[in-house]
Every structure is written in structure tokens, then in C-alpha cells.
Image: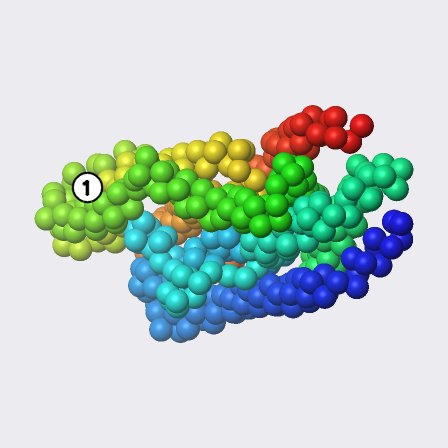
């Protein structure tokens, strides 16, 4: 009987249609991820090459004036591309992973990004995370919504309960066949993604695989729960599709709106205005006061004195730095609110598997907003290190030929992983176990 169930399942046109859709869109999603990785990798390579050429060009034009040479030089700080970002692109298509900065005020430079087609941003990316979160549940629903109700509606269920050794085992077998089919499709896509995007078998890769498995098990558990409500096929389909819309579409939108209203980031605009105003005001501020504040931040530079007559690079860079300093409260407030948004999203996501999987994948692939904020904070440190290294050379008016500018090569940010697999597994396991356990409890007498 069970071999007939397998044959019957694979003879269904719906099954092969579902498999074809999964494979076709899966290949597209992997292709999208591969193109994204290639684009980001090329950008990094071009940045490294460009910085070297840029340095040579500026040295040629300003070979006798270190002040102008360093003023025009740009230094690259790069957030390295993780191969897993091809699976979950997250925020990394919107936020620049390369910061090319000079030694003037930083805040206005940090938020520069590439020009992006707004239509593409509106549509989003068809990456593997999108496929797993949105499409796989629909396939699971299509394959499972009527596995019991159809038998009852056609009158064959009574025969099965009489002839089969265990009606429950029969039902579970039908569900298991579909379970194996879906997981074979998912494994094929993961293997293809690993080969095409050259993803190593790392802990992070297996974390994404495990989280995806548990997410799909949740949808099988939900289908099992609805099936055992013993309603009609049409009712099952409506309930499951409504659940999909609620969990995958409506709740994430509601959560996003709730968090945006609870933690409004109005500082994003005021920070840039404050930085620009603070800098421009310094042109009319007493130069000695500007230098006093500058030396208060960097006491070791006070040996350069308080020149107040005419234009000096010492005063100019002090003025630039104070522009950043005056906007620091807004910057920290904005970053703290963004971190609070992420923390609130994670807390709420524990109860909603689609949202939890998306946030988990972004965190594992280092494409989350938190990762970008950490990159911007590291850019601030990178910028300060270069400034403090160049300031003495500028203020002492050293000749460019005495400075080893070749040592200023693009540097790479070292992102940290905050993802805890155990903490993210527990909610999915508990929700799936509850659905299966409650369904079995309600039908305990039926399947005795």
C-alpha cells in the first residue's frame, strides 16, 4: 500500500509542476546571489586598484605640498563580502560596503552610497532567503492541504481505516512522502548554491541550512494541525493560505510599522545638518577657541600652538573635527535607535517563524542593519587613525617625498558574529512541537 502511495504521489502533475517551479525559481535566485557577489567583489577589486592609481596621480600633481596632497587623498575601508550574502542579500544592496573617505569631516561622507534603481529596490531581490520564506510554504500548503479531507470527501477514508493496519500511520506516511520531496528540492538548491557561489562548509552555512529545515518543519506542522481539524479541502486551503498571508506578509509589515513609530529616527536628518552647520559656523568663530576645543580632544597635538593669523591647516582640520564632534550626540542617538529597532524585531520575531528566519539569515550572512552600523563605527576609528597619523606630517609641513604613502592601503573591516543557533532553534522547535502535540491530542480517540 505504501509503495502505491509513493507511485501515486510522483505520478501527480501537481508534484512535477511544484518541483519545476522550485527548481526554476531556485536557479534564478542562485543566479541573483551570484551576480550580487560578483558585483560586490568587482567593486572591492576596483577600489584597491583605484586607490593605488589615485595616490600616484595626487603625488604627481602635489609633489611639493603635503597639505594639498593629503587633502585630496581618499582612503578605502571595506566591509568584506561573505559568500553567504548571496543566499540572503538583506540590507547590503542598499548600504554601501565600501567607504572611501578623506581626512576632512567624516559624518557627511559615511552615508554616501551608490545610485540604485528605485524600481529594483521596490521589487526587491529574488534571493534564496526569499524563495525559502515565501515560496516553499506555498508549495507545502499545495501538497498537503487535502491529504486527509480528499480521502474523506471521496469516501475512501473509511476503507482505509478498515483495511490499513493503522490509519494514523497511513496519514503520516502520506505526509512524510511530501516532506521528503520538499527537503530533497531544498537540498538540491543548497548544494547548487554552495557550488555556484563557492560557499565553504562553515558553521554559518550549516546554521542557515538548519534554520531553513526548522522553518519548513514548522509549515509541515501547521499543515498537520489544520489537516487534523477534519474540515473540508476548501476550508483547509483557505485557513492555510490565510495563515501564510498573515505570517509572511501582514505581520512583518505591522511589526515594521510598529517599530518605526516606536523608534523614529529623525536624527538621521538632523545629524547631517548639525555637522554642516557646526563646521560652517567655525569660519566665524574665534580661531583660538576652535583650537582649544581641538586640543581638548587631542592634547598631544597642543605642541603646535595657537596660530590665529591667516589661514592655517591646523585650524582648518580642527574646525572640520569639531563639526563631527558637535553632531556626535545625534549620531549616537540614531545608532542606538537602530540597535533598539533590531533588538525589538528579534524579540517579536520569536513568535513568528518567517520574520525570525529572515532576521537570522541576515545576521548569519552579515547583511543586517546592525552589521552596517558596526561597519560605520569601525569607519570612524579607521578615519581617526589615518588623521592622527597624517596630522603631524601636515602641521610640520614635511615634504611628500619623506612620507611613505604606499603604506596607506585599503583596509578591511572584521565583522563579528552575534548569532546564537541555540537561541533561534528553541522558538521554532517549541512552536512546531506545540502544533503537532495539540493536533495529536485532539485526535487521540480517532487514531486509537
User: Eyeballing the image, is 32 above or below 295?
Assistant: below
User: Eyeballing the image, is 78 above or below 13?
Assistant: above
User: Residue at position x 68%, y 48% from top?
Assistant: 153
Instruction: For mark 1, give the secondary structure.
Output: helix
Residues 348 and 65: in front is 348
Locate residue 135: give its quadrant.
bottom right
User: Residue at position x 89%, y 37% from top?
Assistant: 165
Answer yes or no: is residue 287 visible. yes
User: Residue at position x 17%, y 55% from top?
Assistant: 311
**In the rendered image, which residue does mark 1 sit on?**
290
Residues 149 and 342: in front is 149
User: Eyeballing the image, is 6 above or below 61?
Assistant: above
Residue 242 is situated, as x and y percent measured from the top left of the image, at 51, 46
Residues 323 and 37: in front is 37
Q: Residues within 10 Å of mark 1 (few under 14, many from 20)?
A: many
User: Residue at position x 80%, y 28% from top?
Assistant: 448
Residue 99 is situated, as x and y percent measured from the top left of the image, at 43, 56
Task: Tell me if 176 is positioned left or right of 263 in this view.
Answer: right
Residue 382 is situated, as x and y percent measured from the top left of the image, at 45, 48
Task: Tell me if 106 is positioned left or right of 177 in this view.
Answer: left
Amino acid at each position: 500500500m505504501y509503495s502505491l502511495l509513493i507511485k501515486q504521489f510522483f505520478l501527480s502533475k501537481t508534484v512535477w509542476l511544484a518541483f519545476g517551479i522550485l527548481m526554476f525559481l531556485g536557479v534564478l535566485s542562485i543566479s541573483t546571489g551570484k551576480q550580487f557577489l560578483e558585483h560586490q567583489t568587482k567593486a572591492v577589486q576596483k577600489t584597491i586598484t583605484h586607490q593605488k592609481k589615485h595616490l600616484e596621480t595626487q603625488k604627481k600633481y602635489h609633489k611639493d605640498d603635503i597639505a594639498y596632497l593629503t587633502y585630496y587623498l581618499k582612503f578605502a575601508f571595506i566591509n568584506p563580502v561573505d559568500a553567504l550574502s548571496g543566499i540572503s542579500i538583506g540590507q547590503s544592496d542598499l548600504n554601501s560596503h565600501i567607504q572611501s573617505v578623506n581626512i576632512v569631516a567624516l559624518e557627511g561622507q559615511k552615508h554616501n552610497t551608490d545610485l540604485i534603481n528605485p524600481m529594483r529596490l521596490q521589487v526587491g531581490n529574488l534571493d534564496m532567503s526569499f524563495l525559502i520564506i515565501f515560496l516553499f510554504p506555498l508549495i507545502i500548503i499545495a501538497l498537503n492541504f487535502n491529504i486527509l479531507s480528499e480521502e474523506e470527501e471521496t469516501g475512501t477514508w473509511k476503507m482505509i481505516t478498515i483495511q490499513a493496519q493503522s490509519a494514523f500511520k497511513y496519514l503520516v506516511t502520506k505526509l512524510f512522502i511530501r516532506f521528503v520531496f520538499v527537503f530533497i528540492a531544498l537540498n538540491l538548491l543548497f548544494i547548487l548554491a554552495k557550488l555556484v557561489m563557492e560557499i565553504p562548509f562553515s558553521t554559518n552555512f550549516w546554521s542557515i541550512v538548519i534554520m531553513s529545515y526548522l522553518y519548513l518543519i514548522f509549515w509541515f506542522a501547521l499543515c498537520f494541525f489544520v489537516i487534523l481539524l477534519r474540515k473540508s479541502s476548501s476550508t483547509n486551503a483557505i485557513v492555510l493560505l490565510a495563515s501564510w498571508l498573515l505570517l509572511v506578509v501582514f505581520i512583518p509589515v505591522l511589526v515594521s510599522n510598529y517599530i518605526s513609530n516606536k523608534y523614529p529616527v529623525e536624527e538621521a536628518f538632523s545629524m547631517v545638518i548639525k555637522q554642516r552647520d557646526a563646521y560652517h559656523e567655525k569660519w566665524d568663530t574665534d580661531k583660538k577657541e576652535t583650537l582649544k576645543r581641538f586640543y581638548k580632544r587631542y592634547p598631544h597635538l597642543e605642541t603646535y600652538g595657537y596660530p590665529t593669523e591667516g589661514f592655517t591647516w591646523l585650524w582648518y582640520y580642527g574646525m572640520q573635527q569639531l563639526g563631527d564632534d558637535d553632531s556626535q550626540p545625534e549620531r549616537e542617538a540614531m545608532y542606538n535607535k537602530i540597535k533598539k529597532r533590531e533588538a525589538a524585531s528579534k524579540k517579536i520575531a520569536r513568535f513568528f517563524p518567517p520574520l525570525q528566519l529572515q532576521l537570522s539569515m541576515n545576521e548569519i550572512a552579515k547583511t543586517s542593519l546592525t552589521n552596517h552600523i558596526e561597519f560605520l563605527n569601525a569607519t570612524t576609528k579607521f578615519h581617526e587613525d589615518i588623521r592622527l597619523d597624517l596630522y603631524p606630517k601636515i602641521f610640520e609641513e614635511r615634504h611628500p617625498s619623506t612620507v611613505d604613502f604606499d603604506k596607506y592601503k585599503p583596509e578591511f573591516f572584521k565583522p563579528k558574529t552575534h548569532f546564537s543557533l541555540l537561541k533561534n532553534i528553541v522558538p521554532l522547535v517549541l512552536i512546531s512541537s506545540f502544533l503537532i502535540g495539540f493536533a495529536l491530542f485532539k485526535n487521540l480517540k480517532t487514531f486509537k
